[in-house]
Amino acid sequence: MKIIALFLAMGLERLATHLFHWRELRWRDPLFDLGLTHSARLGRVWPYLWLVLTLAAAVAPVVILRFTLEDALLGLPYLAISVVVLFLCLGPQDIGEEVDRWCRALSDGDEENERIYGHALLESGFTGVGTSRGDVPGAVFVQANNRIFAVIFWFVLLGPIGAWLFRVSDLARRRALFQAERDNTESAVAPDCERRANDVHAVLAWLPARIAAVGYTLAGNYDAGREAWAARSPDGSLEARNDHLLREVGLAALSLSREADEADTAWFIRAARAAKNLALRTLWFWLVGVAVLTLFGVAV
């Protein structure tokens, strides 16, 4: 059932690009704002409890649908719900399209769209100069885990409940980042609250990030990727360590060298598109892996 839902959802994503705005799920923002606001006003332990309760409230409708529809009409309603939930959880935007749009904007000298799509990939800190442009390929590997691989992992493990849980944790993290970046003194969301939302999301992303990194090595330069994995990760938060592993292993597995006479713009575009292609190749490894697990009765 899961493999059918997965392939149907991936096919729907290819065909229904005009529905991507549904995946923004802005109607969830008031719930996240409520949880983040209470989290910001409490002590050290209670904020995490508020965040967990917020995620539980967001996941509750999917839990109810899952146990209500699982055995109804030979499981067909459950399959339909699984496809819809998985489609909503992937993204919100297609990472391949986003990279292509960033590359076109950079090639055309369209600074505004370059900033928009660069910020979407890096999530923050895109300045439109060489350093930020050079960070885009590594960000592709991080975003591929946030938008695709971790969603698939939790879907295989827990069905639509797992996929939705990871998605709402990512939405809460993004909402906390948005609130922290706002120049609004009335906002009750402090930087510490952003960190806590990142911590909750990072726990859910930890194992998928490592499986994704394995996929990058298998789909790219295995030896270089393995050496990058073996290198010591810098100290920092769990989120920072997850992102560092994905970036470094992905870039090493990419093994892309800059040509001596290659212009900066051409190099940035080529590197970003190569990272996108490696991430998409890795996705095929994941789909084959899920299919194999299904054959052995592990992912059903």
Image (cartoon, rainbow, N blue to C red):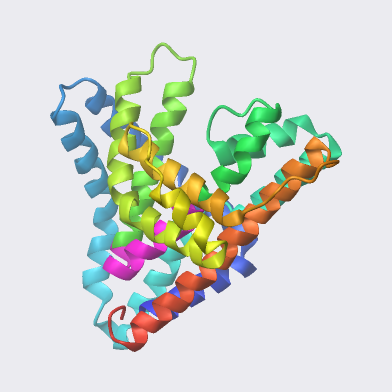
The image quadrant of residue 242 is: top left
Direction from residue 284 to residue 54 in the image, left or right: left
Magenta-colored segment: predominant secondary structure: helix
Q: Is residue 92 visible?
A: no
Residue 119 screen position, x and y as percent:
60, 34
Residue 192 screen position, x and y as percent:
30, 23
Residue 204 screen position, x and y as percent:
30, 50
Direction from residue 97 to residue 176 in the image, left or right: left
Q: Is residue 166 visible?
A: yes
Q: Which residues are magenta?
A: 144-161
Considering depth in this image, is 117 or 28 the residue closer to the camera? 117
Which residue occupies 72% across, 47% down? 101
149 falls in the magenta region: yes
The image quadrant of residue 151 is: bottom left
Which residue occupies 60% across, 37% down? 135
Which residue occupies 28% across, 80% down? 298
48 falls in the magenta region: no
Direction from residue 81 to residue 99 in the image, left or right: right
Image height of 132 relative to 260, above or below: above
Residue 173 screen position, x and y as percent:
38, 37
